[in-house]
Image (tube, rainbow, N blue to C red):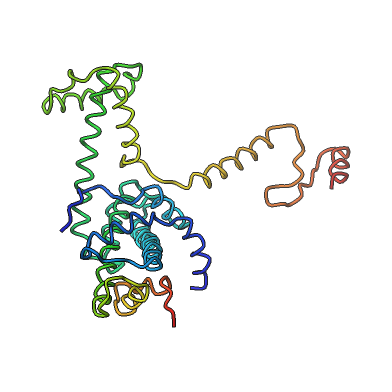
């Protein structure tokens, strides 16, 4: 593992806030227990390494099932691989609680959209109507919400939904758009009237057309 | 066991996400997975500090020192992955 030093430099940028680590750690220790500053830093490093360790194991699970997106099930089953199978039960409870929270937020957000009645009505109208009908059985509070507060509440809920929404994924955005741009460049070069001097591999293009264009090519070489 | 509400993490999700993204082998990770990893990390920190504290107690101290962490890592298979992370002063 010769790259550990390099990794440490990167790890420093990603350190989890010491105050939060401290809170977590002291929460399970007797009162008046102290943690030496160096020790706290080490715990923070350890947490970062654990994140990578578990994420990597979960990724292996996903890949072994021919999937590219790491799913909650991958994380849960990877716990055994990292010798932390004892966490599985409690983590599963968290997962169910999280799903329940999501459902609740989705319903609330849909209900509030109905109340505002914007141009977005056409999009996902059926979904919202379904949610609305679901909520009607659960609560009558919709009519009580005044207009301006509804708009603010909607934005806050959508923000937190955006963070928590299950279908969203983290993708390698940068890599994907770079590839896309490269492809665009190739296509536009072919279409235009410019003479392609070399292919993407760097091999010079030998033109078999008129001598004039041939001469131009060699000049520019 | 603890009083924290289920399904919510106190670690900053953005940093957990960034840490996960560091791994080039990981194509993408659902937000729910990031949350679970974050929660597992909280649980790990608790476990780790409890193990380290056992050693602190044996030494009749109230302050967890780095060497306690290093000792815990050395003695416990579950913590073996941390072998190169905690510097052990010789």
A193 vs A141, nearest the viewer: A141
Residue A125 percent across, percent down from the top left: 28, 22
Q: Please identify the quarter of the rendering in which residue B67 is found.
A: bottom left
Most distant residue in the left direction? A137
Q: Is residue A87 above or below residue A177?
A: below
Most distant residue in the front direction? A32
Residue B46 percent across, percent down from the top left: 26, 63
A174 vs A216, nearest the viewer: A174
Please state if B58 lies on the left or on the right of A197 as rendered: left
Please state if B87 lies on the left or on the right of A123 as rendered: right
B51 vs B56, nearest the viewer: B56
Q: Is residue B5 above or below residue A63?
A: above
Q: Please identify the quarter of the rendering in which residue A220 is found.
A: top right
Q: Is residue A96 above or below residue A188?
A: below
Question: In the image, what residue occupies the spot 20% across and 65% down?
Answer: A30
Please state if B36 lies on the left or on the right of A191 as rendered: left
Question: In the image, what residue occupies the spot 14% across and 24% down?
Answer: A136
Most distant residue in the bottom direction? B90
Give the total of numbered labels. 0
A150 vs A94, nearest the viewer: A150
Residue A113 percent across, percent down from the top left: 28, 22
Residue A35 percent across, percent down from the top left: 32, 66
């Amino acid at each position: 593992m010769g790259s550990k030093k390099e990794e440490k430099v990167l790890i420093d940028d990603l350190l989890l806030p010491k105050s939060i680590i401290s809170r977590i750690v002291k929460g399970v220790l007797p009162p008046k227990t102290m943690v030496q500053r160096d020790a706290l830093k080490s715990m923070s490093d350890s947490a970062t390494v654990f994140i990578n360790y578990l994420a990597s194991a979960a990724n292996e699970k996903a890949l072994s099932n021919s999937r590219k997106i790491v799913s909650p099930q991958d994380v849960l089953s990877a716990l055994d691989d990292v010798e932390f199978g004892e966490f599985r039960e409690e983590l599963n409870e968290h997962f169910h609680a999280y799903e329940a929270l999501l459902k609740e937020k989705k319903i609330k957000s849909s209900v509030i959209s109905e109340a505002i009645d914007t141009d977005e009505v056409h999009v996902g109208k059926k979904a919202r109507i379904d949610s609305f009908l679901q909520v009607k059985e659960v609560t009558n509070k919709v009519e009580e919400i005044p207009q301006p507060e509804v708009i603010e509440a909607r934005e806050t809920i959508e923000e937190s939904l955006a963070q928590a929404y299950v279908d969203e994924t983290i993708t390698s955005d940068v890599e994907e758009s770079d590839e896309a741009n490269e492809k665009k460049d190739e296509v536009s070069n072919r279409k235009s009237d410019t003479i392609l001097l070399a292919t993407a591999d760097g091999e010079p293009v030998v033109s078999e057309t008129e001598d004039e264009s041939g001469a131009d090519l060699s000049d520019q070489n | 066991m603890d009083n924290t509400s289920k399904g919510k993490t106190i670690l900053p999700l953005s940093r957990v996400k960034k840490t996960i993204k560091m791994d080039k082998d990981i194509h993408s990770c659902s937000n729910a997975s990031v949350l679970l990893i974050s929660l597992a990390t909280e649980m790990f920190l608790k476990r780790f500090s409890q193990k380290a504290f056992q050693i602190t107690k044996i030494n009749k101290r109230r302050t967890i020192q780095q060497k306690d962490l290093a000792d815990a890592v050395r003695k416990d298979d579950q913590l073996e992955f941390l072998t190169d992370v905690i510097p052990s002063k010789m």
